[in-house]
Image (cartoon, helix red, strand yellow):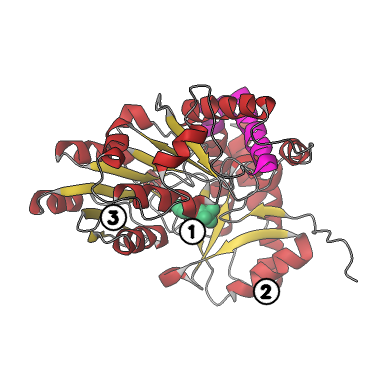
């Protein structure tokens, strides 16, 4: 016989999942009810309203897809890309590469705009790709590249999509809740996010919204959407509102309680306040790390506050540091991916994990661990530098 699984209590400061607040965890433990129960449907309507506020959209096709962020990505591409469609895909990290995969698997042609990992998407290169190619169906890019900690200029990229008459598909998995995302203001046509980054929910749900032009594109497809589960035409019957809900699939009832609670918390705090909180704790963490002699990969003007990518000091075995942080402090930080593997750490300050206690704890754990490994860092200054930011 196996015993009950009791996970250790960790502090999650990696690239996701982030710490889930006790309020959200206890919401999840409430009694399961039927997914067509009128009370459940009332809650679904509230989730939709709160997601519309968060995405800053009036789009009726705003819903949580019952699967993780990757499924939100797939929902956008499988509905909007038909065989032969050209899509300009911006890649400056891991997730742009996944967009390319999606486009190609659904029979589209991905026209790649490549930028270095650690740099934002270059607007001039995107404009050139849009100008050089006829009949581009969509421009796809990642707003907040979690593999590097870079913020790209979503507003200007969407303006380019509009200038060249194509749809915009935006990955907001890590941006939503941590920095401003303005679907209607920027003219985003299709957007997806995830629950486990700055919304601080357990992983497994992907908020998605399609604007009017994207809905028209789905309705006017020449071929049926090749995924039954993610076909927006079908899911609309369940999430579309208008009073009547038809069975499509059994919603992950308790996970949606969690999403509801996290959205209530976010709106209680206020979105602007949440963004400011992410910026403040990022500033404190940055001051501490830089005082210690640990430097950032990304230029200041395009750094994400919620994902801090820093260079591993000379001669340090980065995997050993992460193992020791986990074993000795129960603290999780992230490793580098792809070309950055072994060279950087990714320190998340997402959602509930983004607080003063975590910043001070992480600085102290990292300083102690690096010191004990004789890493070339300056001791005794990180906490003071971070506190100076809080006391300013
Ligand atoms: C985490 C992440 C995803 C994938 O989300 P999952 O919930 O892991 O499927 C997609 N895009 C970006 C930018 C991410 O950070």
Give the residues in magenta.
252-276
The answer to which of marks 1 and 3 sits earlier in the sequence is 3
Mark 3 crowd level (few <14, some 14–19, many ≥20, 10 Å Cα): many
Above/below status of 121 relative to 255: below
Residue 315, picture quadrant: bottom right
| Residue drawn at the location 65% of the way across and 29% of the way down | 265
The residue pinned by badge 1 equals 295
Q: How far across and how far down the image is residue 318, in percent?
A: 59, 72
Q: Residues within 10 Å of mark 1 (few under 14, many from 20)?
A: some
> Where's residue 2, x and y in %?
88, 69
Which residue is labeled 3 in the image? Answer: 90
Dot 2, how many residues are within 10 Å of its Cα: few (below 14), some (14-19), or many (20+)? Answer: some
Which residue is disc 2 drawn over? 373
For the residue with label 3, is its CB less than 8 Å from the closest atom of ligand 1? no
Quadrant of the frame with the N terminus: bottom right
User: SS of the residue at dot 3?
Assistant: strand
Q: Is residue 9 magenta?
A: no
């Amino acid at each position: 016989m196996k015993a009950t699984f009791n996970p250790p209590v960790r502090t999650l400061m990696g690239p996701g999942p982030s710490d889930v607040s006790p309020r959200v965890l206890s919401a999840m433990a409430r009694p399961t009810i039927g997914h067509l129960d009128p009370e459940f449907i009332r809650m679904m309507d509230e989730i939709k309203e709160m997601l519309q506020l968060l995405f800053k959209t009036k789009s009726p096709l705003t819903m949580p897809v019952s699967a993780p962020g990757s499924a939100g990505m797939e929902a956008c591409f499988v509905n909007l890309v038909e065989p032969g469609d050209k899509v300009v895909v911006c890649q400056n990290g891991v997730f742009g590469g996944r967009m390319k995969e999606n486009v190609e698997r659904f029979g589209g042609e991905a026209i790649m705009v490549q930028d270095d990992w650690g740099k934002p998407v270059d607007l001039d290169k995107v404009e050139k790709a849009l100008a050089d190619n006829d009949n581009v169906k969509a421009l796809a890019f990642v707003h907040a590249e979690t593999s590097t900690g870079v913020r790209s200029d979503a507003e200007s990229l969407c303006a380019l999509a509009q200038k060249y008459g194509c749809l915009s598909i935006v990955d907001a998995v890590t941006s939503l809740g941590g920095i401003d995302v303005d679907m209607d203001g920027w003219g985003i046509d299709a957007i997806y996010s995830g629950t486990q980054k700055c919304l601080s929910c357990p992983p497994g749900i992907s908020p998605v919204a399609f604007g009017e032009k994207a809905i028209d594109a789905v309705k006017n497809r020449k071929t049926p959407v090749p995924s039954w589960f993610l076909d927006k035409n079908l899911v609309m019957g369940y999430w579309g509102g208008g009073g009547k809900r038809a069975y499509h699939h059994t919603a992950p009832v308790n996970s949606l309680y969690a999403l509801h609670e996290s959205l209530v918390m976010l709106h209680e705090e206020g979105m602007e306040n949440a963004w400011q909180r992410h910026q403040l704790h990022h500033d404190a963490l940055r001051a501490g790390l830089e005082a210690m002699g640990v430097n950032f990969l990304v230029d200041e003007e395009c750094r994400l506050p919620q994902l801090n990518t820093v260079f591993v000091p000379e001669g340090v075995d980065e995997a050993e540091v992460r193992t020791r942080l986990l074993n000795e402090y129960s603290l999780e930080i992230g490793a580098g991916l792809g070309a950055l593997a072994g060279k950087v750490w990714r320190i998340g300050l997402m959602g509930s994990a983004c607080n003063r206690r975590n910043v001070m704890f992480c600085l102290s754990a990292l300083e102690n661990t690096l010191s004990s490994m004789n890493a070339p860092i300056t001791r005794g200054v990180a906490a003071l530098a971070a506190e100076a930011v809080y006391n300013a």
